[in-house]
Image: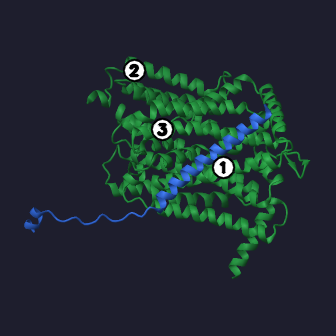
Amino acid sequence: MILSAALVSGYAVILGSASGRAPSPREIVFSAALVAGYLAALGFVAVRARAAREYADFSLARRSLPLALIFGSLCAAYVGPGFSYGFVAMGFKSGVLFLCVGLAYAVQNILVGVFVAPRLRSLSGCHTLGDAIGLKYNRACQVIAGIISVGLCVGFAAVMVSALIDVVTGLFHIPGWVVAVAAIVTTTLYTSFGGLKASVMTDALQFTLFSILMPAIFLYELLWCLQNSAVTFTHELVTATSEGFRSTPPVEIIGFIVAWFLGETAIPPYANRALATQTTRSSRNSFILGGLFSVLWFTIMISLGIVARAAQVGGTPVAIVPVRERDVLLTLAKTTMPMEGYVLLLVALLSVIVSSLDSLLNAGAVAFTQDVVTPFAKVPDRVLLIYGRVATAVIATVAGIAALAVPSIIKGLLICYTVWAPAILPALVFGLWLRRPRVLAGMLSMLTGVAVAVSLQFVWPNVVGIPPILLALAASVVAYFLGHIFGGGLMRCASCQR
Amino acid sequence: MSTVILVGVILVAAAVTGSGLWVGSVLIRAVTRVERPQPRTEMPATEKRAE
């Protein structure tokens, strides 16, 4: 009884500090029911997904997942903080300019669906991207790809934890470390026990939640908080877009388009989903549908940002002045929505971030086990499963610590994009499409890509004014072709040996 | 023109919601499906004889 009273009063204090006013009993009950319902649904789905009994369950869910779940999970994995409230802030600042950047991402997804995912899925016995590279080149290349994959998953997961701290601390003024520990422990628990199936099924739940809640919030703002909706919306859209094009240098726009086009191409969580589909056809379709969905999603997020420019409460215009640029969505909700709506937004944002985090943890753990452990030792299936579970926990812990060093969400994402694309893409794409890829080419391309990307990010930033991802990618492609020309007789690839 | 844009974004919002409902319905079917144990099949006559 005392504990329940303490919990209720604690919750009321948190809710009050979030909204800036004391909540009524009805608001407390309704919002607490929402949060409890969300947690209960998440727990129920995680339990129904069941604990993985074998490594094949943990890594690929036995390739038994239907198209709809893979599609939902793929979208939930890529819709993170940058693609949700990051895009709302961009819509507020520069109208539909960032929709063009988003379109690059959609095109990339569709191209991956057409050219990469089916080829990846058709490789037999592959659990990871590193596996595919190992099959096309050799074991050393698999290990290099595995190390890069694990590093990237840690980096992306750190950005997600940092975003989570940012949102919850910004909303509820709870200490950041409490948020980080709670999120990491919950996500690690269901990801390490349920493996990919738990990750995909909980992602599908999160996708369902945020793809219903965010359009609902948008329609509420559009139809109830905008006087003369159609004319005002169009006027703000035109004004913000022309401001955006005026204030953003073309080089910066090109840099964003390139980063969004290449940076997340076939990253480990997406590759795992491509490999976990039932057929090559559903692998292709899930990516194509994912690409098309991203266009719709970006449109809604950008539109929310545009609505925020002219929001009104009770017919009186209210100026949305976020303390930090990225807080537009939260400030809009705080200013215009009832407390229940504000809690709904919190649930939607938690879904967005947690779904990306669990995918990264699972993908990192599978990459570690499959690409870093198995090339060196023949390990029994039961032990591999244990390695996978422990790796999930370790990656989550390292990401939690690394989250403290993330400069900002967009910067953190850009660093990961800049390393991933040059390090893996040339070796992967040429490996999948060339008849006889050469080991030296794959190895040189991956090592050069990482070295140049890291140097341009941390040692010589902005050295020539060209986006670092482009320079590093060019270096990686050149290294690949040099390796292909000169590496014919030096090292033989796995496919040549067969 | 303004009305067309407004109707357009409302349709986009509906499409996003529709995607969520589709995935949600498949998820509900997946989590509520009861997996029955495989019925025991009659042992082949040769195995019976071997026993």
| Quadrant housing residue A415 | top right
Whether residue B48 is visible to the viewer of this picture, yes or no, is: yes
Q: Which chain is mark 2 on?
A: A
Callout 2: helix, strand or loop?
A: helix
Whether residue A161 is visible to the viewer of this picture, yes or no, is: no
Residue A116 versus residue A193: which sits nearer the camera?
A116
Q: Amino acid at mark 3?
A: Asn
Callout 3: helix, strand or loop?
A: helix
The answer as to whether the residues below labels 3 and 1 share one chain is yes
Tell me the quadrant of the picture where the C terminus of chain B can be found: bottom left
Q: Amino acid at mark 1?
A: Ser
Residue matched to label 2: A484
A217 up-or-down from A436: above or below: below
> Mark 3 or mark 1, which has the lower sequence index?
1
Q: What color is chain A drawn in?
A: green
Residue matched to label 3: A285
The answer as to whether the residues below labels 2 and 1 share one chain is yes
Q: Residue A307 at what x, y percent from top left? A: 80, 42
Mark 3–mark 2 distance (CA, rounded to whole Å) = 32 Å
Name the residue rendered at 47%, 45% in the picture: A67
Q: Which chain is mark 3 on?
A: A
Residue A273 versus residue B10: which sits nearer the camera?
B10
Please give left or right for residue A12 compared with residue A192 in the image.
right
| Quadrant housing residue A321 | top right
Residue A412 versus residue A281: which sits nearer the camera?
A281
* Chain for colour blue: B
> Mark 2 or mark 1, which has the lower sequence index?
1
Name the residue rendered at 75%, 68% in the picture: A28
Tell me the quadrant of the picture where the N terminus of chain B can be found: top right
Mark 3–mark 1 distance (CA, rounded to whole Å) = 32 Å
Q: Residues within 10 Å of mark 2 (few under 14, many from 20)?
A: some
Mark 2–mark 1 distance (CA, rounded to whole Å) = 41 Å
